[in-house]
Image (cartoon, rainbow, N blue to C red):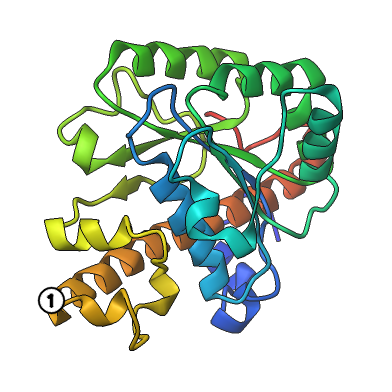
Amino acid sequence: MGPCMSALSLDRYIDFRPELSRRDGPAPIYVVCSPNRQVGKTMLARLLTEHYLADARPVAAFDLADEGPGLADFLNRHVTIPNINDMRGQVQFFDGLIESADVPKIIDLSHREFANFFTIVDKIGLFEEARRRSIEPLILFLIDPSPVAAKTYGLLRRRFAGFSLLPVRNLTVAKGLPYGAAFPHASRLVVSLQLAVLGPAARAMVEHEKFSFLNLAKPERPYSEMSARTRTELEAWFRRARFQFHEMELSLMREQIMTALHSDLGVSSIGPA
């Protein structure tokens, strides 16, 4: 198998069958973030967590939000609320992120914890250590039209050069906002993440704290109260999100294979081009 491998041969090599996806595959650290509030961070973290749960795959989710409703309010049985405001809590949390290379970690990062989190990550070299342990950090940045978002994205791109920084477009707040200028795709992963706009009834349903996409078919409240049209809309919305997440995982698997093939050159292929 030579280094110049086509995408088709890579797909055949990966053999990403449904039953394989439940046991294997990459286990990155996802940092879902923005310096601003109400841009869809928790929604994206919820979708990503339920994506893994839908495949009966292990996942560790962390709620670093400081205002509700947060990730733990929707998925309390699957979410941990860490404390990174003291040394003991920091050691426990950040060490735990790189203990296992088999379980994906999803962090819903509050806009108020944003600066503190990335300052600690940079200071302790967390992303570098994670990569040494074959754990790939992926920063999923919710973009919006504010100057603060553009400035912060640029700061992250410079501070964590070599690691994947992926702009995520929530069409509720970022429709029409161009990617290329202020939010360039800073990763070799071939994926474009986007959250479509939900209708008013569907939006109200997903904001219900007892709501889970995995329970849409259940004949109990709040699911029994929704119309067939709303149920169909939410099922299609979740499927679209899961398709994008599968594409992201496949792209990461391809890049990890290429990195392994070129390891003798000492070159990583997962970060920005």
Residue 204 percent across, percent down from the top left: 22, 57
Q: Residue at x 77, y 60 (%)?
A: 102
Question: Can see residue 6?
Answer: no
Q: Residue furthest bottom?
A: 219
Could you say which quadrant of the image residue 247 lies in?
Answer: bottom left
Q: Residue at x 73, y 58 (%)?
A: 103
Residue 50 percent across, percent down from the top left: 50, 65
Residue 215 percent across, percent down from the top left: 41, 78
Q: Is residue 268 left or right of residue 186?
A: right
Q: Residue at x 77, y 29 (%)?
A: 126
Examine the rendered structure and indicate whether residue 200 appears above or below residue 20: above
Could you say which quadrant of the image residue 214 lies in?
Answer: bottom left
Q: Is residue 200 left or right of residue 68?
A: left
Q: Nearer the viewer, residue 123 or 9?
A: 123
The residue wearing badge 1 is 229
**How crowded is the residue under tag 1: few (<14 C-alpha within 10 Å), some, or many (20+)?**
few
Q: Is residue 168 left or right of residue 59?
A: left
Examine the rendered structure and indicate whether residue 253 appears above or below residue 183: below
Q: What's the amino acid at mark 1?
A: Arg
Could you say which quadrant of the image residue 206 lies in?
Answer: bottom left
Q: Residue at x 53, y 60 (%)?
A: 75
Element under disc 1: helix
Question: Can see residue 112?
Answer: yes
